[in-house]
Image (cartoon, rainbow, N blue to C red):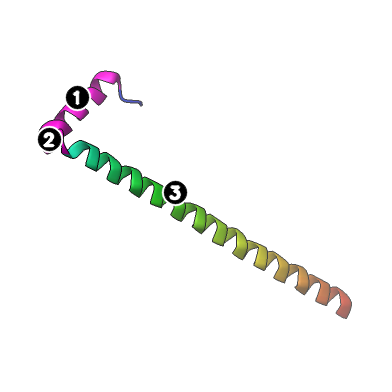
Amino acid sequence: MRPGLWQILLVILIIALIFGAKKIPEIARALGRSSGEFKKGLKEGNAAAAEKAEEIKEALLNEDEKSDKQA
């Protein structure tokens, strides 16, 4: 369920009342930076997982080749 326009405006109004209009741009920048860092961390984690999966795949292929030669 997606929030409607009035719901979003109400949340923005409440945030403005709580934090003040001057703090909102600072909060938005901080959220943007943290979102960027989160995405960067996900990319690094995915790259590391793909690298590890490739290492495991190569190791399994090498084991298969060794067992074929011995048989």
Magenta range is: 4-22
Q: Are marks 1 and 2 in contact (CB under 8 Å)?
A: no
Return the disc, 3 or 2, that comes first in the chain's sequence: 2
Residue appearing at x 60%, y 58% in the figure: 50
Spatial CA span between label 3 and label 2: 29 Å
Front disc: 1 or 2: 2
Q: Quadrant of residue 25?
A: top left
Residue 57 x/y as whole percent = 70, 64
Residue 54 percent location from the top left of the image: 66, 63
Q: Are marks 3 and 2 in contact (CB under 8 Å)?
A: no
Q: Amino acid at mark 1?
A: Leu
User: Could you tell me if the residues under marks 1 and 3 are in contact, i.e. CB atoms within 8 Å?
Assistant: no
Of the image marks 1 and 3, the number of the one nearer the N terminus:
1
> In this image, 63 relative to 9: left or right?
right
User: Disc 2 marks which residue?
Assistant: 20
Secondary structure beneath dot 1 equals: helix
Figure quadrant of the N terminus: top left
Q: Horizontal and vertical percent for residue 59?
A: 71, 71
Name the residue furthest bottom: 70
Give the label on residue 10, or none: 1
Q: Is residue 9 above or below residue 49?
A: above
Q: Amino acid at mark 2?
A: Gly
Task: Give the number of the disc on residue 55.
Answer: none
Task: Write down the quadrant of residue 32 in the picture.
Answer: top left
Is residue 24 visible to the viewer in this orientation of the structure?
A: yes
Residue marked by disc 3 = 39
Question: The residue tagged with tag 3: helix, strand or loop?
Answer: helix
| Alpha carbon distance from label 1 to label 3 | 29 Å
Which is in the foreground here, disc 1 or disc 3?
3
What SS does tag 2 mark? loop
